[in-house]
Amino acid sequence: MTINTVLLTAILWALVSTTSAQNYYPADIGNTWVLESTDGAERITYTLEIPEEDFSGEQFRALKIITEVLGTSAINTNTFLIEVDAEGMKLHKVVAELGDVFGVSRLEFSPPAVFFPPTLQIGEVWETVGETEVYLVGSVTVSSTNKVSAIEDVVTPAGTFENCLKIRIDTKTTAAVGSSRSTSYQWLAPDLGPVKFETSQDIIFELTSFNLITPEVPYDINADGMVNILDLTFVASRFGEADPEADVNDDGVVNILDLVLVAQHFGN
């Protein structure tokens, strides 16, 4: 099939401003964010790692969220198995530590649920529903409704971040013994990720440090120092081919995923 390079490039160019602006959760393996509660009592550490499970493809990540009560041995880890592609971030599994009494619960999503959609803007809404078994409780259904409710500047110990998305998370937990509801908030900074979190108990966590890994995949195809329309045109001109220079995600063929990756890194 012959691809009209000019048309394909024009379409991607029209999407560039939207796509590149929506990188609110950089998904490179090794990225780390550390947030601490404003009272200094707790710390949350987010890390993106290679999954322990045998999943093929470089698009899979294990997002580990470790919560600590500082000065004590209290610590728990929740692990999210996510897939990153042109459709956004998709959730396959959650392994949650519920404490000494209830143990560990596992939620699996088939088909995978939306973790973050490919574009985020004011009014965007997505839902996640999963079922699990909890010791001493039985079957439990957990559902959350996520909504981008505002764009705000956020001041943290790690700096001031402009145009952050404020996401409202309404969660409902249903079991045989009854149901409960809670609301929390998360703030994501453009091209950086989580900078603030407010729990349903009104505990506020703010970013204290972070480390973002430079991707190994070279999106600056022509090595002119910036990812721009020239790189996008080069990739589009080799659409459908097995050209290693244009196959930026190294999956064996130049396709829409390569175009989206280049577009997401425009201006870098």
Image (cartoon, rainbow, N blue to C red):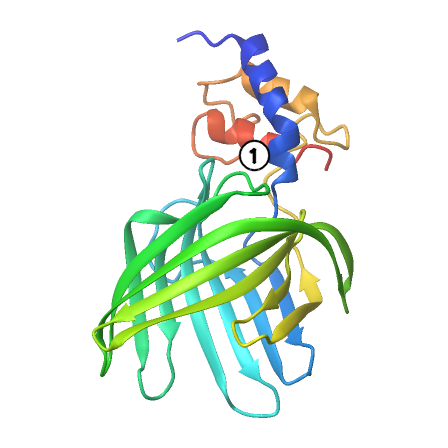
> Can see residue 155?
yes
Callout 1: helix, strand or loop?
Answer: helix
Which residue appears at 47% of the width and 45% of the height?
Answer: 125
Q: Is residue 256 above or below residue 199?
A: above
- Residue 134: x, y in percent? 26, 76
Using the image as rendered, state which of residue 257 and residue 191 is in the foreground: 191
- Residue 109: x, y in percent? 29, 54
Which residue appears at 32% of the width and 76% of the height?
Answer: 104
Rendering quarter of residue 108: bottom left
Most extreme residue toward the bottom is 72
Q: Is residue 111 above or below residue 131?
A: above
Q: Report the quarter where the N terminus lies.
A: top left
- Residue 187: x, y in percent? 62, 58
Left or right for 56, reference 140: right
Q: Is residue 110 above or below residue 197?
A: above
Rendering quarter of residue 233: top right
Mark 1 sits on what residue? 261
Q: Is residue 192 above or below residue 18?
A: below
Report the amino acid beneath label 1: Leu
Left or right for 257, reference 56: right
Count every numbered label the image shows and give the total.
1
Which residue appears at 57% of the width and 58% of the height?
Answer: 30
- Residue 103: x, y in percent? 31, 81
Q: Report the quarter where the C terminus lies.
A: top right
Packing grade of label 1 (10 A; few <14, some 14-19, many >=20) is some
